[in-house]
Every structure is written in C-alpha cells, then in structure tokens.
Amino acid sequence: RDVTGVQTCALPIWLAICVVAFVVIGLVLWKEQVASALGRAADRVASAFLRPFRKGPVTSLEPAIVDIRRQTIDVARTRWFWLTCASISSQLAVFLVFLLSMRFVGIPASKASLAEVFAAFTFGMLAGSVPVTPGGLGTADAVYIAVMVAGGAPSSAAVAGDLVFRTLTYLLPIPVGAITYVIWRRKKSWLKPGGAQPQAS
C-alpha cells in the first residue's frame, strides 16, 4: 500500500513535467528565437558541467536545436498525413499489447475497464515522453501502475502486467535490434555497387 501511495502521489508530478515539456516544445516550434534561447541556455549548462573537467566551452547545442526545429517543421509540412497515420497505427498497436498484458495477468474488465486501461496507457506514454530515463523506464511504469491501481486493479497484478508489457515492448526489441544491426552491417548485397558517384562536369 505504501508503494501504491507513492506511485499515486508521483502521478501529478509526472503529469506536471509532461505539461511543461510539451509547452516548451510548442514554444520552440512556434518561434525560432525561443529555440535559439533554449540552445544558448543548454550550451551554458553543458559548459558549466564540463568546466571542472577542463573541457568546453560548448557552442554546438544552439545551432543543433535550431536546425532540428527547421527540419521538424519541414517534415511536418510535407509528410504530415503519413506521419499521422503511422503514429496512430503505432500507438494503437502498442496499446493493444498493453491491454492484452493487463488482461493476461488477470485484471478483468470488472476491475479495470477499457477506458481505465486506456487512461493508464495514455498517461504512462506522456510520462515516458519526457526523457528522464531511456524509454521512460521506471517513470512511465510508475504512472502505468498508479493509474491501473487507482482504477481498481490489484497492485500486484498491475505490476505484473507492466512487467509483461515492458518485456514485450522494451526488452524483447533489444536483442532483435542487435541481430538486425549485425545483419545490416555484414550484408551489403542490397547496396548500390560503388555508391552514387558524382559526374564530372
């Protein structure tokens, strides 16, 4: 119960972090001056961090953030439809895995309805979008479990469901990705022979 209480108290904190993060991202995309100011601030923080190690100053973050903003806007303007379709399809597929994971560990609809499971998934994904840990590991999980428990699911079953979900969507892709990376590095047959050579003028 103490763990559940801590998770429930942490939920508003993570939601507030998510709101702040999305506001900052929105401002960066809205005005280039905001992106530039954020980049300068990041340069100063990074420089202060590296100063005791006699490294720096860092000046690369400001142009990088401004460039990322421009690329993001360009892609959103030209590919917005397919990006939207791909994003919705991807999120629905992950939600299906989350729902089946919770049902698999014994949380029936009478304990947590479809809407409550969807709320847990949504809030967890929002918390995981803030890059505190890789893939929101730990932070998103606390929100998943807290919302499921708040909706009426047993805490032990919510933890088990989260572990099943994370195993399928976080741990399992790691070895699969490593294997495909090795294949991609070793197999060259699909590459164009010699690459694209510039023509002499």
Image (cartoon, grey):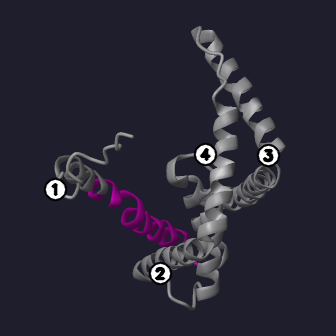
**CA distance separating discs 1 and 3:** 43 Å
- Checking the image for residue 32, the label placed there is 3
Range of magenta residues: 153-176
Q: Nearer the viewer, residue 101 or 41?
A: 41
Q: Secondary structure at mark 4?
A: loop
Q: Which residue is mark 4?
A: 132
The residue that appears at 49% across and 74% down in the rendered structure is 90
Q: Horizontal and vertical percent for residue 63?
A: 67, 35
Badge 2 density bin: few <14, some 14–19, many ≥20, Cα 10 Å: some
**CA distance separating discs 1 and 4:** 40 Å
Q: Secondary structure at mark 1?
A: loop
| Quarter the N terminus occupies | bottom right
Q: Which residue is mark 1?
A: 189
Ranked by sequence position, the earlier of labels 1 and 3 is 3
Q: Horizontal and vertical percent for residue 67?
A: 65, 43
Q: Which residue is mark 2?
A: 96
Ranked by sequence position, the earlier of labels 3 and 4 is 3
2 vs 3, front mark: 3
Ranked by sequence position, the earlier of labels 2 and 3 is 3
Mark 3 and mark 4 in contact? Answer it, CB < 8 Å. no
Q: Secondary structure at mark 3?
A: helix
1 vs 2, front mark: 1
**CA distance separating discs 4 and 2:** 25 Å
User: What is the quadrant of residue 55 in the picture?
Assistant: top right
Badge 4 density bin: few <14, some 14–19, many ≥20, Cα 10 Å: few
Ranked by sequence position, the earlier of labels 1 and 2 is 2
Mark 1 and mark 4 in contact? Answer it, CB < 8 Å. no
**CA distance separating discs 2 and 3:** 38 Å
